[in-house]
Image (cartoon, rainbow, N blue to C red):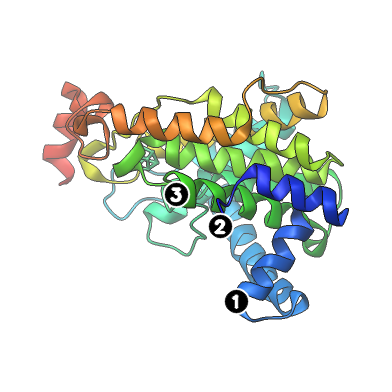
Amino acid sequence: MHYSADYLLAECQTRQLPLSEVYRRGEAELVGLSPEALDERMLEVLEIMADSSHKGLEQPVFSLSGMTGGTAYKAWQHRRRDPLLGEFVMGAVAMALSTSEVNASMGRIVAAPTAGASGILPAALASAKHKYSLTLEELLPALYTAGAIGKIIALEATVSGADGGCQAECGTAAAMAAAGLTELLGGSPAQCFHAAGMALIHVMGLVCDPIAGFVEFPCSLRNASGLVNAFVSADLAMAGIESLVPFDQVVDAMYRVGKMMPEALRETSLGGIAASPAAKNLEKKFL
Ligand code: SF4
C-alpha cells in the first residue's frame, strides 16, 4: 500500500472523518499511544514552534557563524509601516524568519520537515492562532493535517535538499502549512490536498544552494516566501480553485525534477546563489 493522498482521501470518505483525524488515529496506533496521549506530545511540539516563531521578533537573533541575523526583527518592525503585504502577512513573514534565525543560532526548533525549512509551518500556525483567536489545542488538527502531507512526501519522494533541492524542503513545508491552514479554515480533505499540491507546484524546480553550506542564506528568505506560498495556496483552495494535477502526481513530478537536478544544485554549495562571487567572498570570510 502506498501512503498517498488517494489512500487518505478514501479513508476520510469511508470513515467520514477529516484528514487530521484519520492521520491522528493512524499515527497514535503506529506509535502505540492513545490519540489523547499523542495530542499531549503534539501540544509540546506546538509550544516549541510558538517559541521559535516569536524569539526573533522583539530582539535580533544572529547565527552561530555570524553571517546572518536580525531579519525577523526588521520585518516585524516593518509590519507597522504599511507594507505591501499588509500588517498580518508581514508579521507572519517575520515569524517565519524568526524560526529560521533560531535554527541558525542553534536554538530549539521543530524540523517541519527539516531544520532548513523549519520556519514556515510555525509561522503559519502562530499567525492563524493570532488572527482567529485560537488556543494551541485548536491548532492540533492543522498540525496533524500538515503531518499527513509531510509523511506522504517523505515516504513517496524526498524532503531533503541534498536529494531533491529546496523544492523538497521549503516546498514540502509550504505544502504542509497550506494543507493545515486549509483544514483550519474549514476546507474539505480534497481541498487540503489541492492546497498542498499548489504549494509544491509554485516552487517546482527550486534549487538548494546555501552559501558556504550554512543553512542561512538563501534559506531564511525561502522560509519567508514559503510562508506566503502557503497562504496563497490555502486561500486559492478555499476559493474553490483546484490543482488540475492530483497531489500524488505532483509529489511524483517534484521527485523526478529533484532527480534531474545536477549535484551542484543539491546542497553542495557549488551552484546557484552559493556559486556567485559575493557568496564565495562570504565563504572565505565565515568558513
Ligand atoms: S536552500 Fe537548501 S539548505 Fe537552504 S532551506 Fe533550501 S533546501 Fe534547505
Q: Amino acid at mark 2?
A: Ser
Q: Amino acid at mark 3?
A: Glu
Q: Which comes sooner in the sequence, label 3 or label 2?
A: 2
Q: Tell me if 257 is positioned left or right of 41 in this view.
A: left
Residue 106 picture location, percent across and down: 38, 61
SS for callout 1: helix
Cα–Cα gap, marks 3 and 1? 32 Å
Name the residue beneath numbered marker 1: 31
Crowdedness near tag 2: few (<14), some (14–19) or many (≥20) residues, C-alpha within 10 Å: many
SS for callout 3: helix
Residue at left 71%, top 76%?
A: 40
Looking at the rendered image, the disc whose residue lies closer to the viewer, 3 or 1, is 1
Residue 72 picture location, percent across and down: 52, 42
Q: Which comes sooner in the sequence, label 2 or label 1?
A: 1
Q: Tell me if 127 is positioned left or right of 59 in this view.
A: right
Crowdedness near tag 3: few (<14), some (14–19) or many (≥20) residues, C-alpha within 10 Å: many
Name the residue beneath numbered marker 3: 101
Q: Nearer the viewer, residue 50 or 24?
A: 24
Query: Considering only vertical position in the picture, is 154 above or below 106?
Result: above
Residue 119 picture location, percent across and down: 53, 47
Query: Considering only vertical position in the picture, is 34 above or below 237?
Result: below
Residue 52's label in the rendered image is: 2
Cα–Cα gap, marks 3 and 2? 9 Å
Q: Which comes sooner in the sequence, label 3 or label 1?
A: 1
Q: Tell me if 254 is positioned left or right of 164 in this view.
A: right
Q: Nearer the viewer, residue 128 or 31?
A: 31
Residue at left 48%, top 52%?
A: 155
Residue at left 20%, top 25%?
A: 278
Q: Is residue 185 visible?
A: yes
Residue at left 59%, top 65%?
A: 48
Q: Is residue 60 visible?
A: no
Q: Amino acid at mark 1?
A: Val
